[in-house]
């Protein structure tokens, strides 16, 4: 965060204060602030250390090695969606009058059966198929080993969903931080001894094992394998749509790596994957601070569109104000600084990093619309958007882009898909709950305007300061963030629809 910028507690105080009258009656704001603080702590510690570990591993291995891991992880990410089958979202989303122990037991039993089948299918079919498709036995072996994680998903997912439903983010955070740190200690030992990609594979497996144990320890739920046909029928409609939507989202998110694995070398896949990881880890983990908390909150408020509109615009504004400066820093300084940190073997990922950072900026402007659709019981809307953008836009754009421009073309295709997806989602949300499009556009303009000081400071420092290029770039970004932090403090005192994150009169920012 920028020097002089708001603290984490300031951020959540502003985000969840001054709520509309219906929200104050529910007295949800204090709980939301607490939830957001714990979720932010989870993100900063767990994801932060995992991010640093992957960068350290990248320093010791070649892009080709990282490409092997990326291909195996992409396969795992797609198959993992089948493991939950949308059941976890059902546990969180289900209203109190329809929430039963039979629902939880059935979700766990169904997920356990699916996870056992997936483990066997991954070992016997998917892993060998991956080795054949990508022409690498090491990709197949890594895919098979990572598949061990499937067996621990049911306990993790159901325990976490119940903790989230109970708003016990503290317990979930403690469990995840502890399991992440333990897995990183073990993976670091593997890295020191062997200095290869297996350190990353071991970290993923151990993190799941430790997390399953920790979740069961901190939660009050004990697994019970029992299937209720009635409960399964009740949840299958909603969970089926969520599951189908998650499958297409997982395919869309990993389609770029899958296409690259078929058309380009593992070295190119490694360069692209690390660039994607550097940019996406910021988007994924900063957004999760809002998305985890807001899915629960939107589910509670699903019949109160005034309250939903209020939070949609405010969270979008915070998303943009936090993510845009980080992505601008990556666009400006990333191609200069990262090769110095990781080695010259990674220098070629610069343009790819810039396009992927642009795609994250576009996604930040989209806010939490996908979460709103699911929480309002309309996952079919998100599914239609995901299917349409993945098949009509992303797939052909990837094939054309990769064929003509390699990994840079793939990154440009992703940016195009994100842009069009954001536009469609915002229009659909405006039609669903009304009066969000205009305030979102105003907040978008305000968020972009707020980034101008960072760019101006960059241009000035890079022209004037007589230092080595990497050091000059680092100083320019630090000074730019300091000026941006001062700008945020100034925005807090200005009542403007351009920055609804700081609005003291929420009833003025979104008109129903």
Image (spheres, helix red, strand yellow):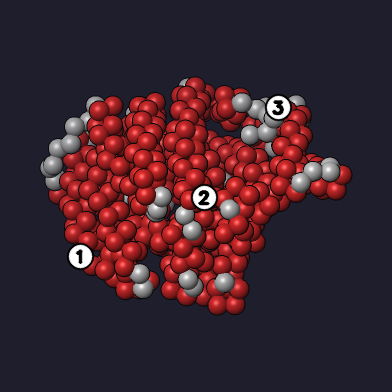
Crowding near pointer 1: few (<14 within 10 Å), some, many (20+)? Answer: few
**The furthest residue to the left:** 226
Residue under numbered circle 1: 124
Q: Secondary structure at mark 3?
A: loop
314 up-or-down from 11: above or below: below
- Asked if residue 263 can be seen in this view, the reply is yes
Query: Closer to the camera, 212 or 492?
Result: 212
81 with respect to 326 (left or right): left
Q: Residue at x 69, y 30 (%)?
A: 3
Residue under numbered circle 2: 59
**The furthest residue to the right:** 464
User: Percent from the top left, x then y, of residue 269?
Assistant: 49, 64
179 up-or-down from 436: above or below: above
User: Percent from the top left, x then y, of residue 59?
Assistant: 51, 50
Circle on res. 14? none
Disc 1 or 3, which lies upstream in sequence? 3
Q: Residue at x 57, y 58 (%)?
A: 346
Number of the front mark, 3 or 2:
2
Do callouts 2 and 1 mark residues in contact (Cβ within 8 Å)? no
Disc 2 or 1, which lies upstream in sequence? 2
User: Percent from the top left, x then y, of residue 117?
Assistant: 18, 57
Q: Residue at x 60, y 67 (%)?
A: 408
- What distance separates the C-alpha of mark 1 from that of mark 3? 55 Å
Disc 3 or 2, which lies upstream in sequence? 3
Residue under numbered circle 3: 4
- What distance separates the C-alpha of mark 3 from that of mark 2? 32 Å
User: Percent from the top left, x then y, of residue 421?
Assistant: 55, 60
Count numbered badges in the picture.
3
- Asked if residue 298 can be seen in this view, the reply is no
Looking at the rendered image, the quarter that the C terminus falls into is top right
Q: Secondary structure at mark 2?
A: helix
Q: Quadrant of residue 50?
A: top left
């Amino acid at each position: 965060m920028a020097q002089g910028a708001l603290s984490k507690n300031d951020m959540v105080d502003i985000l969840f204060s001054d709520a509309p009258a219906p929200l104050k009656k529910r007295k949800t704001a204090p709980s939301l602030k607490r939830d957001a603080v714990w979720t932010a702590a989870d993100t900063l510690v767990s994801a932060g250390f995992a991010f640093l570990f992957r960068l350290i591993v990248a320093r010791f291995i070649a892009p080709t090695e990282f490409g092997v891991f990326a291909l195996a992880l992409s396969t795992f990410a797609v198959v993992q969606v089948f493991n939950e089958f949308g059941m976890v979202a059902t546990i969180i989303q289900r209203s109190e009058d329809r929430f039963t122990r039979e629902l939880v037991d059935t979700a766990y039993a169904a997920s356990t059966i699916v996870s056992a089948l997936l483990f066997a299918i991954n070992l016997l079919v998917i892993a060998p198929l991956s080795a054949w498709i990508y022409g690498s036995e090491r990709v197949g072996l890594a895919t098979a080993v990572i598949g061990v994680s499937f067996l621990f998903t049911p306990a993790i997912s159901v325990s976490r969903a119940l903790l989230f439903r109970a708003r016990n983010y503290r317990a979930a955070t403690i469990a995840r931080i502890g399991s992440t740190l333990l897995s990183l200690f073990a993976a670091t030992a593997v890295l020191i001894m062997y200095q290869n990609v297996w350190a990353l594979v071991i970290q993923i497996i151990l993190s799941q094992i430790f997390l399953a144990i920790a979740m069961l320890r901190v939660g009050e739920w004990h697994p019970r394998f029992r299937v209720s046909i009635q409960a399964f029928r009740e949840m299958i409609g909603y969970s089926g749509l969520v599951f189908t939507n998650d499958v297409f989202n997982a395919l869309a998110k990993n389609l770029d790596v899958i296409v690259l694995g078929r058309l380009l070398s593992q070295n190119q896949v490694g360069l692209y994957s690390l660039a994607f990881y550097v940019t996406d880890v910021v988007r994924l983990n900063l957004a999760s601070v809002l998305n985890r908390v807001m899915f629960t909150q939107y589910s509670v408020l699903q019949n109160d569109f005034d309250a939903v509109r209020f939070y949609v615009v405010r969270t979008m504004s915070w998303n943009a104000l936090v993510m845009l400066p980080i992505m601008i820093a990556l666009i400006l300084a990333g191609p200069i600084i990262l090769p110095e940190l990781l080695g010259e073997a990674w220098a070629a990922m610069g343009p790819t990093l810039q396009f992927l950072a642009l795609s994250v900026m576009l996604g930040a402007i989209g806010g939490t619309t996908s979460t709103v659709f699911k929480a309002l019981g309309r996952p079919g809307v998100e599914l239609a958007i995901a299917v349409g953008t993945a098949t009509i836009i992303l797939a052909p754009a990837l094939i054309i882009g990769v064929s003509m421009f390699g990994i840079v073309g793939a990154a440009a295709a992703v940016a195009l898909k994100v842009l069009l997806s954001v536009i469609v989602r915002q229009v659909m949300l405006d039609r669903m709950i009304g009066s969000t499009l205009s305030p979102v556009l105003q907040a978008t303009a305000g968020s972009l305007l707020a980034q101008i000081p960072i760019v101006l400071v960059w241009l000035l420092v890079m022209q004037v300061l007589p230092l080595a290029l990497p050091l000059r770039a680092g100083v320019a970004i630090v000074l730019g963030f300091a000026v941006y932090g001062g700008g945020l403090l100034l925005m807090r005192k200005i009542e403007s629809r351009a920055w609804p994150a700081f609005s003291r009169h929420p009833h003025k920012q979104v008109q129903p």
